[in-house]
Image (spheres, rainbow, N blue to C red):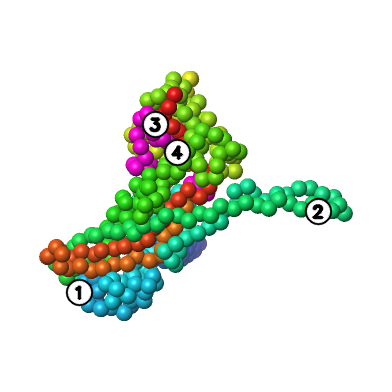
Amino acid sequence: MDTERDTDQLAASFDIVARQDAADEAIGLLRSDVDEVKARIERIGRAAARPALSTGEPSPEVKGFVDLYLRQGREAEVKSISGAQPQDGGYAVPREIDALIASQLKEVSPIRQIAQVVQTGTAGYRKLVSTGGTASGWVSETAPRPETDTPEFAEIAPPTGELYANPAASQAMLDDAAFDLEGWLAAEIAAEFARAEGAAFVSGTGANRPRGFLAAPVSHAGDAVRPFGTLQYLGSGEATGFDEEPEGRLIDLVHALKAGYRQGACWVMNSATLAEVRKMKTSDGAFLWQPGLAEGQPDRLLGYPVTEAEDMPDIAAGQCPIAFGNFRAGYLIAERSATTILRDPFTNKPFVHFYATKRVGGQVLDSAAIKLLRIEA
């Protein structure tokens, strides 16, 4: 009897072990399936996040433009999107490359990041802006409706100019099939465009270039009495710098801007001015400057993000080194929607130059949306 009992117990133990092994195998297969699904989702996410030019084979238009015209100087069937034709000496780049140039330009051009940008199909751009708003009022259900005042408008026509860049590559680079020509060209053009337009959007004169917001007329008067198109400035309190309580001046500058514009407003200054501002403290010893609390979050001054624009003037008598405002409402950039490229292999042999041009304009759109801090007593 004991032998039979031991045999039954041993058989039961083997059965339990077998069932456990089967369960472990099933769990392992399930985990493998889950890991495979996760890997597929990650691959799909990475593919969706890639830029358009780096996913798969480029379009025939891009391939023909890069391989025939840019690399070899031969004619390519490129659809013109700006009126440029081969007989005019250049080509309008395909939309994919133009979009890549535009995306990189936005990343490196500080004012373009915060201003309003419109695409135009012609050289000129005009916009009507209401200067006084439309009159309104309250009445009862059956009361007559009195006639309202006629709104007044001002025309905005940003001065434009031909922005150009002239990057060069050796013929050996162009002959190398592994050389990412379209990526290199987009980065070079964007970098050169950003340097040129950065100065124009800040202090451009408007002669064959945009008119910068610091080139607009300025006045100490408030919004109610200041002429349209004239920016308001506040004094720093000292002839050559800031007074003993600079935080008060910056707070006054913030609240000189109407509440509707403060949503989305930011500071604009160069790195030298920013270095001075970061040292400022309140009366209780706290820094006005607050670093971003999370990765990707901007550093803030009095609760508003700061944009570094190296073309802003330094702190000096009579200068406006700090601007505060809602630049999406206050400054307009108008550009023709295509970049044209002329391939020039003759001027500087053995290098091949790519002469890129684009029409860009800019002007203050709403002078109530931008305030300036001026160094003066």
Residue under numbered circle 3: 318
Residue 92 in the magenta stretch? The answer is no
* Residue depicted at x 33% and y 69%: 93
Q: Nearer the viewer, residue 17 or 96?
A: 96
Name the amino acid type tagged 1.
Answer: Gln
Residue under numbered circle 2: 145
Q: Is residue 195 above or below residue 317?
A: below
Residue under numbered circle 1: 72
Q: What's drawn in magenta, residue-wise? A: 305-330
Tell me the distance, in whole angstroms, between the alpha carbons under discs 3 and 2: 51 Å
Residue under numbered circle 4: 323
Name the amino acid type tagged 2.
Answer: Arg
Q: Residues within 10 Å of mark 4 (few under 14, many from 20)?
A: many
Tell me the distance, in whole angstroms, between the alpha carbons under discs 3 and 1: 54 Å
Pointers 3 and 2 in contact (C-beta within 8 Å) = no
* Residue depicted at x 35% and y 55%: 208
- The quadrant the C terminus occupies is top left
Upstream in sequence: badge 3 or badge 2: 2
Q: Residues within 10 Å of mark 1 (few under 14, many from 20)?
A: some
Q: Locate residue 215: give its quadrant.
A: top left
* Residue depicted at x 71% and y 50%: 149
Q: Locate residue 268: give its quadrant.
A: top left
Q: Is residue 97 left or right of residue 126?
A: left
Upstream in sequence: badge 4 or badge 3: 3
Q: Locate residue 95: give its quadrant.
A: bottom left
Upstream in sequence: badge 4 or badge 1: 1
Upstream in sequence: badge 2 or badge 4: 2
Pointers 4 and 1 in contact (C-beta within 8 Å) = no
Pointers 4 and 3 in contact (C-beta within 8 Å) = no
- Asked if residue 66 can be seen in this view, the reply is no
